Amino acid sequence: MNNPVRALLGLSGFALVCAGLLGGIDYMTRERIAENIEQARKLKLLEVVGAVVAPPVEIGELTLEGFGYAEPRTGHVIAQDGAVRAYVLPVRAPDGYSGAIDLLVAVSPDAEPVVFGVRTVQHRETPGLGDGIERAKSDWILSFDGATLEQPADWRVRRDGGDFDQLTGATITPRAVVSAVHRALLQYRRQHGELQGRPVLWEDAGEDAGKDTGDNAGAAGAPRR
Ligand SMILES: Cc1cc2nc3c(=O)[nH]c(=O)nc-3n(C[C@H](O)[C@H](O)[C@H](O)COP(=O)(O)O)c2cc1C
């Protein structure tokens, strides 16, 4: 066999071994990565309701339309001792300084919702300016805790005459977040009656428990026991 052919065979063999190794690593780590993503998702959900509901909790999924997204998204229902305690809404602010900002907004299951917490899950705002909407960077996102549609009276940033502080040197980002959370609350209140009848897929039960009536009046069905 001449040298070029031998080199080609050698290279092909090497490429095959590498592909096999990569495939093997991918196979071995896929489950672990999925578990980590799931764990991170749960931690974020627990964090956003953390001021009001402490573990252990039951987590259910439901499909939500709107809330700033063009496509339906998965929202969450948090229950404890068989009663629904919170909804966690996926909310998008389309008009950040650098594009869309994705948020989680936790609200009480009441017809007049109380905000339990808001967290930023994804954004491209400028480090040192707009990224103050991250909990890790500042306390600003905590300004929503306990808010309702009536209190504060004016859901705008102070620069626009409202009751929410802006960030130093950055008004566009907080303006986008405040108005997205406000719109989400208005949508939630409008749909409240209909939302409670929606099917919920409870994590542990793995079944549709949406037809049950929870202990919490006006809330979606709590998990079956
Ligand atoms: C490079 C650069 C990046 C900026 N990034 C942001 C940002 O992420 N969020 C934001 O609200 N404003 C950002 N700004 C500032 C806005 O252009 C605007 O001036 C500001 O939001 C207005 O806020 P102020 O009225 O408090 O000054 C940035 C400005 C520059 C020059």
Image (cartoon, rainbow, N blue to C red):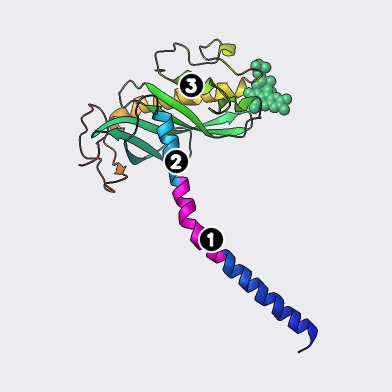
Residue most extreme to the right: 3
Amino acid on which disc 1 is placed: Asp
Residue 57, above or below 112: below
- Tag 1 secondary structure: helix
Q: Quadrant of residue 82?
A: top left
Q: Residue at x 61, y 22 (%)?
A: 172
Q: Residue at x 22, y 40 (%)?
A: 211
Q: Residue at x 41, y 37 (%)?
A: 65
In the shown orientation, is residue 21 left or right of residue 77?
A: right
Closest to the observer, 101 or 29: 29
Q: Which residue is mark 1?
A: 26
Q: Quadrant of the N terminus?
A: bottom right
Q: Is mark 3 within 8 Å of ligand 1?
A: no
Closest to the observer, 71 or 40: 40
Start and end of the magenta stretch? 23-37
Q: Which residue is mark 2?
A: 41
Residue 187, above or below 61: above
Question: Within 10 Å of the Cα at label 1, are there few (<14), some (14-19), or many (20+) other Cα atoms?
Answer: few
In the shown orientation, is residue 58 left or right of residue 149?
A: left
Amino acid on which disc 3 is placed: Leu
Please state the horizontal and vertical placement of residue 106, each as a whole percent of the image: 40, 28
Closest to the observer, 46 or 190: 46
Q: Is mark 2 within 8 Å of ligand 1?
A: no
Figure quarter occupied by ligand 1: top right
In the rendered image, residue 163 lying in the magenta stretch gets the answer no
Q: Give the distance between the C-alpha atoms of the residues marked 3 and 2, in whole angstroms.
A: 20 Å
In the rendered image, residue 30 lying in the magenta stretch gets the answer yes
- Tag 3 secondary structure: helix
Determine if residue 80 is in view: yes
Determine if residue 66 is in view: no
Please state the horizontal and vertical placement of residue 38, each as a whole percent of the image: 43, 46
